[in-house]
Image: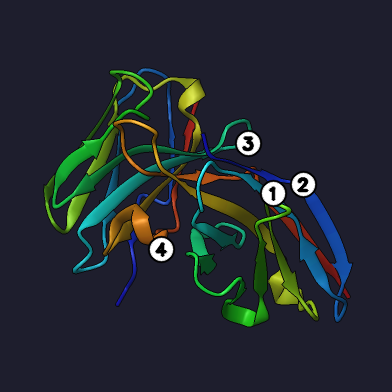
């Protein structure tokens, strides 16, 4: 299996622009997670899906952030408009049994820089 | 509420010497605990997990951790460090909300392990 695939790996954009991050989970995994990692705040859960349905989006910072999962093999995280404080590494992870087992499979991340 | 504290932000060891990464947790019930490793520019990978079975848990790459309820600790150890062990390590607790809400994984701040020749 190729693992969790994220794109782009690096994105540099200017404040106010729209950013779309993409994720392909491991086939057969029913859970998909979006995390954000920064030096100041560490690793934060933004949102997670079960069977393509958003379950907990309490970590989404504000309305500028949105996430979708139109099918079992694809998810997007969109920031519109982007701000410099959104600069971070965004990780997608998938799991076959959710948080209960604690076994999440992470992608290599998308490093976002907003100028 | 559940929380996890990694006692060292940086640990430096020589190759071939033992590794000890310390983690204390806070939980109002018997927790599930995990260690993840993150190599530079990579995603996190599960090293090992404790879910109320054996208190000494063995993981990948020779790492192990011991759950000590009396000390509320879950320290990660390895008898002999390799250069390839240089990475950031995260102690994680699975939280269970008291009322409503959803389970979450609470990540510690991380410990950066450096291994010197």
| Left or right of residue A1: residue B106 | right
Q: Chain of mark 2?
A: B
Q: Secondary structure at mark 2?
A: loop
Foreground of the two, B96 or B6: B96
Marks 4/2: CA distance? 23 Å
The correct choice, above or below, for B77 with respect to A40 in the image is: below
Mark 3 vs mark 2: tell me if same chain. no
Q: Chain of mark 1?
A: B
Q: Residue B24 has which mark?
A: 1
- Residue bearing the label numbered 3: A39
> Which mark is in front, 3 or 2?
2
- Residue bearing the label numbered 4: A103
Q: Position of residue A89 (x, y in %)?
A: 49, 42
* Quarter of the N terminus of chain A within the rendering: bottom left
Mark 4 vs mark 3: tell me if same chain. yes
| Left or right of residue B12: residue A61 | left
* Residue at the image point whose x is 19% and y is 39% from the top: A54
Marks 3/2: CA distance? 17 Å
Q: Residue B7 has which mark?
A: 2
Q: Position of residue A110 (x, y in %)?
A: 42, 47
Marks 4/3: CA distance? 23 Å
Mark 4 closeness class: few <14, some 14–19, many ≥20 residues within 10 Å = many
* Residue at the image point whose x is 22% and y is 45% from the top: A49
Q: Are marks 1 and 2 in contact (CB under 8 Å)?
A: yes
Q: Chain of mark 4?
A: A
> Which mark is in front, 1 or 4?
1
Mark 2 closeness class: few <14, some 14–19, many ≥20 residues within 10 Å = some
The correct choice, above or below, for A28 with respect to A56 in the image is: below
Mark 3 closeness class: few <14, some 14–19, many ≥20 residues within 10 Å = few
Q: Are marks 4 and 3 in contact (CB under 8 Å)?
A: no
């Amino acid at each position: 299996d190729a693992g969790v695939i994220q794109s782009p790996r690096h994105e540099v954009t200017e404040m106010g622009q729209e950013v779309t991050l993409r994720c392909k989970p491991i086939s057969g995994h029913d859970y998909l997670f979006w995390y954000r990692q920064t030096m100041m705040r560490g690793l934060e859960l933004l949102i997670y899906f079960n069977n393509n349905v958003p379950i907990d989006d309490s970590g989404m910072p504000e309305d500028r952030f949105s996430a979708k999962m139109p099918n079992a093999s694809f998810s997007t995280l969109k920031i519109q408009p982007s701000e410099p404080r959104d600069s971070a590494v965004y990780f997608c992870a998938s799991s076959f049994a959710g948080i209960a087992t604690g076994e999440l499979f992470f992608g290599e991340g998308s490093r976002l820089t907003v100028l | 509420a559940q929380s996890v504290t990694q006692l060292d932000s940086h640990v430096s060891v020589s190759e071939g010497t033992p590794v000890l990464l310390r983690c204390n947790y806070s939980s109002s019930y018997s927790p599930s605990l995990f260690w993840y490793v993150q190599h530079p520019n990579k995603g996190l990978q599960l090293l090992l997990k404790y879910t109320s079975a054996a208190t000494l848990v063995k993981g990948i790459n020779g790492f192990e951790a011991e759950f000590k309820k009396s000390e509320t600790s879950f320290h990660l150890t390895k008898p002999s460090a390799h250069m390839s062990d240089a990475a950031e390590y995260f102690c994680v607790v699975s939280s269970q909300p008291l009322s409503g809400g959803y389970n979450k994984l609470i990540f510690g701040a991380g410990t950066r392990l450096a291994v010197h020749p």
